[in-house]
Image (spheres, grey):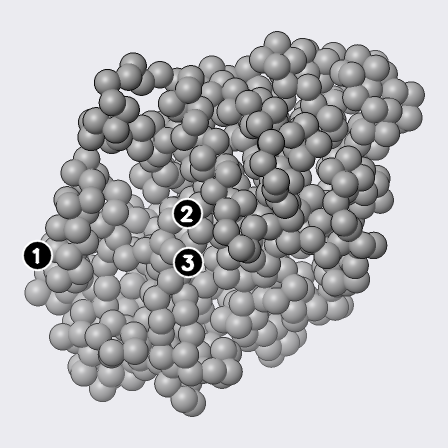
C-alpha cells in the first residue's frame, strides 16, 4: 500500500438511472469542502463515445465545457457549481477514451506482444486515470469517483472491477464505497420497499464490492426500523444508511445530507481531519431562493424545449441570477420553430426578458431571429448566447442594416452577406493539428473550445456588468462574426463591446438604444455559481426586474420559481 494523502470515495448507482448520483456526489463534496478539506470529483462514463461532444442533447443533455476545452458530462457542471472549483479533462473519462488509448498503445507496440485484454489492460488504464487525481503536490484530501450508469449494466463492469482492485491496492481504510439506490414508497401498500436495494447490493457483492454506505433516494425520510432492515440485509453499519429525499431546490441537498449526518459518517469512516462544517453560505442561498421578493418571467427561445437537461447550466445560471436579485425567475420555454409574427405577442405576453441560447443547425433559427427582432423593437431585455448572439447579428444586419440575405454560413453557405462565417484559418489549423494527433477524428475537435481571453470596452453594458477589462470565458462553436461587416454594422449602431485581445475575434455585441441587449459568442452559463451569479446573467435579470416594474407587474408574489412550455 502506498503512502497516500488522498482518500477515495467511489459512488455507484443501483436499481435505475436518474437517481441524482451526480448531485449526491457534488453535495457530499461540498460538505467535505465546508469541513475544510480539499475535494475533487471525477465522472467515469461507461459509454463508447470518446466524449459527449458528438452526442445529441436530446439523448445526453447538455455538453459541459471546461476551461481546458474538454467536452464533458453535465454532471461536471454540478461539480463546478457545488465545489466552486474549475474542472478539467481529467475529471471526466469514458469507456471510449479508455479503449482509444489502449488501442493506440497496442498499435504502437507498447504492450510488447502481449494479448491485450479487459483485465488487466483496460482496468489498468481506468485505475491510472483515477489515480491521476492524487498525483502531484496539490493532491486533494478527497477524490470522489462517480461511476456512470447502473450496477448490472454490462458496459459498467470494467469500471467496477477497477474500483474493486483499487481498494485492495490503496488500502481498505483509504477508500469508501457509497451505493445510491431507490427506495420506492408504495402508496397503495402505504410503505417503503427495500427489495430493489437488496437486489442491487447483491449484484454489487457478486462482483466483489461491499458498499460501506447506502444512500437511499426516496420521497420521504426513511423510518429508523427500515434503515435497520436495509443495514442488516446489505451488511452495512446501522448508522450507514441515509436518505436522499426529493427536494424542490437542488441546492438544499447538501443541507439535507448534513442533517442526516452523512458527511460526518464519511469523515469518520475515512479518518479525515475534518472540522465542523461551515454552511452559512449554503443556508443563505437556500433561504434567499425560498423567499424571493418578486418574480420575473424569462422566455427561453430554443429548439430543445422538451428536454430541460439540454439547458442545464443555463437554467442554473438563471436561478443564480434570480437569487442575486432576490427574485424568482419563472422560465417559459418557447419552441423557436413555432415563433412567427402572428403569434409573438401572445407567446411573449408578460415576458420580462427573452433569451436565445446556443444551438446547432438551421431548424428553428428563423423563429429565433424573429424573437430577437421582437425583443429589439419592443425594448424587452435580450440575452443571446453563442448561436443566440449569431442570430442577433443576423437579425440586426437584415432588419437594421438592410442586408436582406444576411445569414450564417452554417445555414446558407453561398450567401454574399455571411455576417457569421467559418473562420477558415482556424478551421484549417484545427483540422491539420487533429490529423497529426488523431487521424480518426473528423466531427469532434473542429470547434473553438474552452477558455479564451476577451477585452471589454469601457462604457458598455458588458464592461459595467463585469467591472473589469480583461475576462476569460468558455467557447464551443465553429462559426464566428465576420469582420468584413464590422464597419458597416458598427455604423448602423451595433456595438462590439468585447473582442479578443488582438482584436481579431468579436466576442460580445450589444445595442445602445435599448435597455439591455447583449449577445456573447461564448457560454457564460458554464461559469455561473450559486453563490456568485455570472455578471451578465445577474444584470440581465436586473434589467428584467426593471422592465417588470415599468410594466406594473405584480412584484410581491412569493413562492418558488416555475417552468412552463409554449
Ligand atoms: N452553431 C453555432 C456554431 O457552431 C453556434 C454553436 C453554439 O451555440 N454553441 O458556431
Near-viewer residue (388 or 320): 320
Name the mark nearer the viewer: 1 or 3.
Answer: 3
Picture quarter with the N terminus? top right
Which mark is first along the chain, 3 or 1? Answer: 3
Secondary structure category for the residue under label 2 = helix
Residue 224 image offset from top left, x and y in percent: 91, 26
Using residue 477 as the reference point, say whether residue 64 is left or right of it: right
| Mark 1 residue CB less than 8 A from any atom of ligand 1 | no
Near-viewer residue (336 or 132): 132
Res 273 visible: yes
Q: Residue at x 15, y 57 (%)?
A: 429
Q: Which residue is mark 1?
A: 414
Which mark is first along the chain, 2 or 3? Answer: 3
Q: Which mark is residue 89?
A: 2
Q: Residue at x 19, y 35 (%)?
A: 440
Alpha carbon separation for disc pair 1 and 3: 34 Å
Q: Which mark is residue 67?
A: 3
Amino acid at each position: 500500500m502506498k503512502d497516500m494523502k488522498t482518500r477515495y470515495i467511489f459512488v455507484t448507482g443501483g436499481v435505475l438511472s436518474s437517481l441524482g448520483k451526480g448531485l449526491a456526489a457534488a453535495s457530499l463534496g461540498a460538505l467535505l469542502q465546508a469541513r475544510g478539506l480539499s475535494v475533487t470529483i471525477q465522472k467515469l462514463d461507461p459509454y463508447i463515445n470518446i466524449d459527449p461532444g458528438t452526442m445529441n442533447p436530446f439523448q445526453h443533455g447538455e455538453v459541459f465545457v471546461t476551461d481546458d476545452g474538454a467536452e464533458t458530462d453535465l454532471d461536471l457542471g454540478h461539480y463546478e457549481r457545488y465545489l466552486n472549483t474549475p474542472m478539467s479533462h481529467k475529471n471526466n473519462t469514458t469507456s471510449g477514451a479508455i479503449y482509444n488509448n489502449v488501442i493506440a498503445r497496442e498499435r504502437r507496440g507498447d504492450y510488447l506482444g502481449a494479448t491485450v485484454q479487459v483485465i488487466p489492460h483496460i482496468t489498468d488504464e481506468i485505475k491510472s486515470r483515477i489515480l491521476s487525481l492524487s498525483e502531484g503536490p496539490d493532491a486533494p484530501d478527497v477524490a470522489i469517483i462517480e461511476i456512470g450508469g447502473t450496477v448490472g449494466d454490462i458496459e459498467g463492469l470494467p469500471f467496477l472491477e477497477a474500483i474493486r482492485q483499487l481498494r485492495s491496492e490503496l488500502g481498505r481504510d483509504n477508500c469508501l464505497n457509497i451505493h445510491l439506490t431507490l427506495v420506492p414508497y408504495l402508496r397503495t401498500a402505504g410503505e417503503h420497499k427495500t427489495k430493489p436495494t437488496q437486489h442491487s447490493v447483491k449484484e454489487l457483492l457478486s462482483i466483489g464490492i461491499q458498499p460501506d454506505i447506502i444512500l437511499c433516494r426516496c420521497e420521504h425520510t426513511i423510518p429508523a426500523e427500515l434503515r435497520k432492515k436495509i443495514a442488516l440485509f446489505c451488511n452495512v453499519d446501522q448508522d450507514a444508511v441515509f436518505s436522499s429525499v426529493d427536494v424542490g431546490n437542488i441546492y438544499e441537498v447538501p443541507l439535507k445530507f448534513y442533517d442526516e449526518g452523512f458527511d460526518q459518517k464519511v469523515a469518520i469512516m475515512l479518518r479525515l481531519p475534518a472540522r465542523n462544517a461551515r454552511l452559512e453560505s449554503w443556508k443563505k442561498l437556500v433561504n434567499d431562493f425560498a423567499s424571493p421578493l418578486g418574480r420575473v418571467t424569462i422566455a427561453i427561445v430554443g429548439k430543445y424545449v422538451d428536454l430541460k437537461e439540454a439547458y442545464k447550466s443555463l437554467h442554473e445560471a438563471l436561478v443564480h441570477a434570480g437569487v442575486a436579485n432576490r427574485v424568482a425567475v419563472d422560465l417559459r420555454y418557447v419552441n423557436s420553430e413555432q415563433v412567427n409574427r402572428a403569434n409573438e405577442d401572445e407567446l411573449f405576453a408578460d415576458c420580462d426578458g427573452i433569451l436565445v441560447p446556443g444551438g446547432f443547425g438551421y431548424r428553428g433559427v428563423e423563429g429565433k431571429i424573429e424573437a430577437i427582432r421582437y425583443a429589439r423593437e419592443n425594448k424587452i431585455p435580450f440575452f443571446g448566447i453563442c448561436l443566440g448572439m449569431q442570430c442577433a447579428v443576423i437579425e440586426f444586419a437584415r432588419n437594421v442594416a438592410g442586408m436582406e440575405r444576411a445569414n450564417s454560413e452554417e445555414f446558407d453557405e453561398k450567401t454574399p452577406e455571411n455576417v457569421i462565417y467559418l473562420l477558415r484559418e482556424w478551421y484549417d489549423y484545427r483540422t491539420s493539428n487533429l490529423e497529426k494527433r488523431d487521424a480518426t477524428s473528423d466531427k469532434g475537435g473542429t470547434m473553438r473550445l474552452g477558455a479564451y481571453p476577451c477585452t471589454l470596452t469601457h462604457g458598455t453594458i458588458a464592461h459595467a456588468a463585469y467591472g473589469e477589462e480583461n475576462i476569460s470565458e468558455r467557447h464551443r462553436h465553429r462559426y464566428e462574426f465576420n469582420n468584413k461587416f464590422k464597419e458597416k454594422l458598427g455604423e448602423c449602431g451595433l456595438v462590439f463591446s468585447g473582442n479578443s485581445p488582438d482584436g481579431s475575434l468579436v466576442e460580445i455585441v450589444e445595442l445602445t438604444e435599448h435597455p439591455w441587449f447583449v449577445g456573447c459568442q461564448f457560454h457564460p452559463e458554464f461559469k455561473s455559481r450559486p453563490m456568485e451569479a455570472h455578471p451578465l446573467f445577474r444584470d440581465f435579470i436586473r434589467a428584467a426586474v426593471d422592465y417588470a416594474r415599468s410594466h406594473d407587474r405584480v412584484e410581491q408574489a412569493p413562492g418558488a420559481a416555475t417552468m412552463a412550455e409554449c
